Image: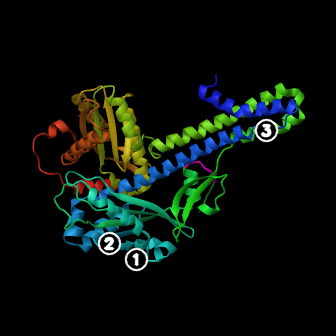
Amino acid sequence: MAKPGMRFIQFRLIGPAIVGLGLLIAGMAAIPYYGVAEIDAGVKQKQETLVARNISLWITDIEFSLTAWTVWDEAIAKIDNAYDFEWTDRNIGASLIGTSRTRFVAVLKPDDSILYSRIDDTVKDKPFFARGADAIINDSSAMIGEVRAREPSQEKTGIPKPLSVSRIEVLGNEAVLLTASLFQPDFRTSEPKSNRAPVLVTAMPIAGSLPEFFGTRFLLDDARVGPLSETTPDRARAEIAVGAKGEVQVLSWRTPTPAADVLWRALPLAVTVGIVLMAGGFFLIRMSRTAAKVLLSRERQMRHAATHDFLTGLANRARLEPEFDTLVNKGALTVACLDLDGFKEVNDTYGHAIGDELLKAVASRLRAGTASSDRLFRLGGDEFAIMIPGQSLLDAQRACRRLSLQLAKPYSLSAGEVSIAASFGLAHVAGPETACDTALGAADTALYAAKLLDLGSVVTTEEMQQPSPAPSRSRRSSERRCA
């Protein structure tokens, strides 16, 4: 039996064609173009919204991965307080280029002049990077200005929120993601010397062409990238980049036109076989059913891509707050943050492909080791979160200890057998008066404490009531940089 949504779409697809057949048989020549255009315009608008949201989430994930380098007391001390070139080159330049897809790194002084820059040898001859650091920083001036404009509003106590601005720039056949991020202290053992902190500027080449990258990623038909002025109105589009002269570049693609397809395929049949209206109507219904299935399938795929991590299949950060609100309105729950111990060593030893394989295996064990009522999320890199409803904090802690033991068992990967551990931080939420960000921040603070203990430790916020020394950032940051 067809689902209500399927029946509704079928009705909207087939309605204009049936009306057209009736009018033709009655001697009327009008064709319901308005109904066809309305349905197809709705499909186009929905795809544009989903693609724009997907691109925004992809950029947000990249920006979040940079916080391991920018929200760090030691970076403030070694770059702003007393500049140490060797430390900066090793822990910022070489580390970013060696552990991510970043191929250009620059650190700007408080006056926005270049303090440090490094371009990877593999891209030095490519047109975008061959222009040199000054040209790349000039391209980033608007983003740097936006970071500076938002800088005074940052909180002065506690771990600050990351502050990053990104955009895609196109130069010839090259596409690069530029990001400007503000350096900030985490535990405030070091503070900027002035009210302006250093800024990190990174450039990440986008592999292949933009149409191929986004078209394959979001299942788009005939994806193209070009100036907005050259894009025809019939194509769906999303602004994604700027050109070398600042012109807007849009990603455009051909959207499904199920209503128009049905109408134009049915029109010859209606004209030539008016006496077999019932047979023609049955044929159109079958056509509309197929078109509706294709449309619903694509919509489900794109909705899933917008709210789930493409590597592990777990829910991503976009699902955090909605799931939290749903669960906390039903009763108390426990929020757990976990971080993999030893993931960086696997990445450094075997490469990112094996690291991705390990993350998939970890996600599989998390699914197997949690209850059906629990909610799993990948926050980015090697960080995950779990929402555990209907259990006391003690029971949730026991469950996380069991899960930690499961995650610590060896993994058989294509490169061989590897072992890691996982540290957990837990925060109990009594009711809806606690916000999602507050609960997640408390669990992350407990996770910091767990990282200072033995590998695979599980710490709750209740266990942190006694004063303890401020946690060190060095180990935590090095592991987050593996993402």
x%, y% of residue 114? 33, 75
Q: Which residues are magenta?
A: 218-222
Q: Which residue is mark 3?
A: 31
Residue sitting at x 32%, y 59%:
150
Q: Is residue 117 above or below residue 229?
A: below
Q: Secondary structure at mark 3?
A: loop
Query: Where is 34 relative to 179, above or below?
Result: above
Q: Does 210 lie within the magenta span?
A: no
In the image: residue 473, left or right of residue 375: left
Residue assigned mark 1: 134
On the image, numbered disc 2 is attached to which residue? 112
Q: Label 2: few (<14), some or many (≥20) within 10 Å?
A: some
Q: Nearer the viewer, residue 16 or 59?
A: 16
Comparing marks 3 and 2, which lies closer to the viewer? 3
Q: Quadrant of the N terminus?
A: top right
Q: Is residue 300 above or below residue 78?
A: above
Residue 373: image quadrant is top left
Viewer-nearest residue: 106 or 330: 330
**Going from the N terminus, do you reach mark 3 or mark 2 first?**
3
Q: Nearer the viewer, mark 1 or mark 3?
A: 3
Residue 465 drawn at (x, y percent) = 13, 39
Disc 2 secondary structure class? loop
**Residue 228 falls in image quadrant:** bottom right
- The 10 Å Cα crowd at callout 3, few under 14, some 14 to 19, many 20 or more, is some
Callouts 1 and 2 close, C-beta under 8 Å: no
Residue reaching furthest to the left: 467
- In the rendered image, which quarter contains the C terminus? bottom left
| Whole-percent x, y for residue 335 in the image | 29, 36
Q: CA distance from mark 3 to mark 2?
A: 62 Å
Compare marks 1 and 2 and give the one earlier in the sequence. Answer: 2
Q: Are marks 3 and 2 in contact (CB under 8 Å)?
A: no
